Image (cartoon, rainbow, N blue to C red):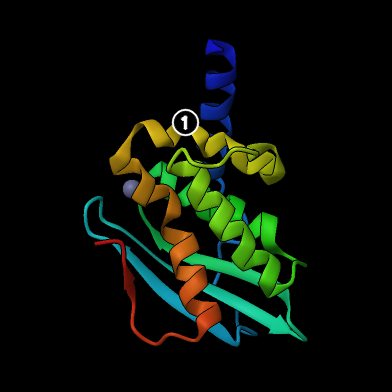
Amino acid sequence: MADLRDLYQEVILEHSKAPRNYRVLQSANHKAEGFNPLCGDHYTVYVDVENGKIRDIGFQGAGCAISKASASMMTQSLKGKSTAEAEDMFTRFHALVTGKNRNPEDLGKLTVFAGVSEFPVRVKCASLAWHALHAALQGKQEAVSTE
Ligand code: ZN
């Protein structure tokens, strides 16, 4: 189990150092800002939705390794998915990081965040980008806060 944990940490560190889709998306027709005052994480998520599908997605901002890696892996997982699939993944991801997901395998690579459920403070870091994504897809104008 210790090896698996190390591997998970490695994936998170790698994504936080070299985040994927880390850019302002000029073509975005949905965007939302998310704050996690507890940790100081602050990101904007940009989504380009066409015919109910996420054609492109990006994010920018700053925060801890977990929040950045989570945002990076979220963008990777959602490109090409329908907005309904994205909302469904958000629900399952949230269940994963709060220790309530019974079938985490469904989430593929995102299961690296399962360990976060042991650290309540980190749950907000891991789910911040997803909350911002949800707000963006719902067309919310105000920034979302985890507090
Ligand atoms: Zn954080």
115 or 59: nearer the eye?
115
Q: Residue at x 65, y 39 (%)?
A: 103
In the image, 75: left or right of 55? left
Residue 123 in the image: state x and y as whole percent.
Answer: 37, 45
In the image, 86: left or right of 33? right
The secondary structure type at the circle numbered 1 is helix
Residue 43 in the image: state x and y as whole percent.
Answer: 40, 65
Residue furthest top as drawn:
2
Picture layout, residue 75 above or below residue 142: above
Total marks drawn?
1
Q: Residue at x 49, y 52 (%)?
A: 94
Instruction: Residue 30: name its quadrant.
Output: bottom right
Q: Residue at x 25, y 55 (%)?
A: 40
Residue type, label 1: Gly
Q: Residue at x 35, y 53 (%)?
A: 63
36 or 134: nearer the eye?
134
Q: In which quadrant of the rendered image does the C terminus lie?
A: bottom left
Residue that numbered label 1 is attached to: 115
Residue 22 in the image: state x and y as whole percent.
Answer: 56, 61
| Disc 1: CA contacts within 10 A as few (<14), some (14-19) or many (>=20) | some
